[in-house]
Amino acid sequence: MIPIILRGPPKPCSDHCHLRCQAVRDCWTARKPKCYHLLHNHLTMSKHDPARTSHSDRQDTTPAGARIPLPQPSTPTVPALEYIFHPRSVALVGAATDPIHWWINEYYIDPLIKFGYPGKIYAVNPKGGEAKGMKIYRSLAEIDGPIDHVVSAIPARNCPQLVQECRDRGVKVIQFFSAGFAETGDPEGIELQNRIVEIAKGSGMRLLGPNCMGLYCPATKISFCHNYPQESGPIGLISQSGSNSTYVVRSAVVRGLRFSKVVSHGNACDINECDLLEYFTEDPETKVIAAYIEGIRDAPRFRHLLERAASTKPVIIYKGGFSEGGSRAAATHTGSLAGSYAAFEALLRQAGAVPVQSVGQMVDMLVAILRMKPPQGRNLCAVGNGGGGSVLATDEFERAGFCLPRIPPDVSERIRKLVPPAGSMTRNPIDAAPLMGIEQARLLSKTGMKEWEKGLWNARFERGDGGMGDFIGALDDWQGLDFLVLHYCIDSVPGGIYSWQLTTGGGPLIVAAKESRLPVATVVHFIANEDSWLKSLKLQKLCIDCGFPLFLSMKGAAAAIRRLMDFDRTHPGMVEKIQASLK
């Protein structure tokens, strides 16, 4: 059992609210029963519709001294927090009336307009005026009709009054972009956070944040970023950090991934990681759960929900603040009091979740789970251009516990007939640059420079073609080979770099691999600068369009595939089932 980890100094309260009571933390750490009933009461809270009571409304009704086992939660027809993603109207309180604060409207008005949000959008600022062609109301009281969702972009000192106004108007959710609360560590900020929780108590209104970016839900046209994709996907993301949520989304999108919903929850004074984990477990649109967490509010409940979630869906968690300095930063960032990372990682592994230690590792793992058939063994063949990149592939994959075995004589003989010896390596790894150059010339001679994209995307490489089809066929006949790693080094030779050159150079190998029986990973790497990145985008898109996982480094690919295999071993059939449901 690990002790509960609280965010911010707890405040004793008359109704024994376990989220704030110092006695509860002390009792739990000492493993006394008093804390147990309070935690049990929290776990057995009733599910609710939009009128569901907030955390701070729950009363302890468990008889003193009782020891009640943790319940097995039932699966509701509609997940408890579903309504927060379906507001009939959104009001931005603190809408910008001057160019200095342009970013407020860009975060919370522009995305709704661009996405085509079907509900009412209200801008509110005591100064009045106009924003984005809309009237700016001076207060919520001026607005006719229901207000479901309020975004607060006002100073923290004014938020208690806003919460009272929202309570009076029957608002269902307040999302606080506003900062300056418990994350500051100052008594004033802590007291302000306590006050907004206290004012919301008993109203049925939920609080998201403070100090957060809020919600992104493509299906209901809600976003805090105007250039996020409008297509939904299978990933549900929980992020205590707003900036990290943006980094994860943008990093995943360029790799062909999409999201069902994203929630940035900041200080988590009410809606917290446990509530969101429970929601995403029950959400049928979410097939994989990813989470960035700095601290846990209710460790026993978190463990219980995590075990349940990981038994039905892959759960990938990046724990921020795992170093001493990072822990201090987390306390400043979201007011989180982080515990031992070793204990946290052990908890994740015992529950069946996948721990990662960076956003890059998280995205690589999402790519692997959603786009790569799990290899059944550790023997791989790496194929690409460039001797240096081939050596790098060997080092990184063998460091991760894989093996690049010698090519059998019969397969080696067939490969040598296809790949000219000059400038190549025909052992494992294979530098197939000469063959790739031959296929590039053959493609361009057929299509010309104007139609090469259409020709490449529609190309077929089959056995008997005397080229790439026979090459992939030879690898397919290699008994004991478990998967292929196909890579293309971008900045590997001097001279100019052109999009057509890169894509027609690496493309035939990628397209030909669609005929392979083996699991395939693609790596587009050796990217030195922005120009090279931009010129490589069509090759990256080809990898994605062919249905392959796209990695941007050998190290990332090796680590993710190793995690994928480990996960498939402990959760047999889960990855295959998810991938089948997405076809």
Image (cartoon, grey):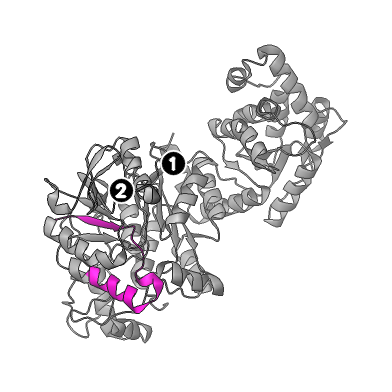
* Residue where numbered disc 1 is placed: 258
Query: Of the residues shown, which amino acid type is indicated by label 1?
Result: Arg
Q: Nearer the viewer, residue 308 or 220?
A: 220
Q: Is 384 rendered above or below residue 204?
A: above
* Label 2, residues with CA under 10 Å away: few <14, some 14-19, many ≥20: many
Q: Nearer the viewer, residue 516 or 318?
A: 318
* Residue where numbered disc 2 is placed: 97
Residue 162, image quadrant: bottom left
Number of marks: 2
The residue segment tinted magenta is 170-197
Q: CA distance from mark 2 to mark 1?
A: 34 Å
Q: Is 246 rendered above or below residue 372?
A: below
Looking at the figure, which quarter contains the N terminus? bottom left
Query: Of the residues shown, which amino acid type is indicated by label 2?
Result: Thr
Question: Residue placed at 68% from the left, 56% from the top?
Answer: 401
Circle 1: element type? loop
Question: Residue placed at 34% from the left, 79% from the top?
Answer: 187
Residue 573 appearing in the image:
no
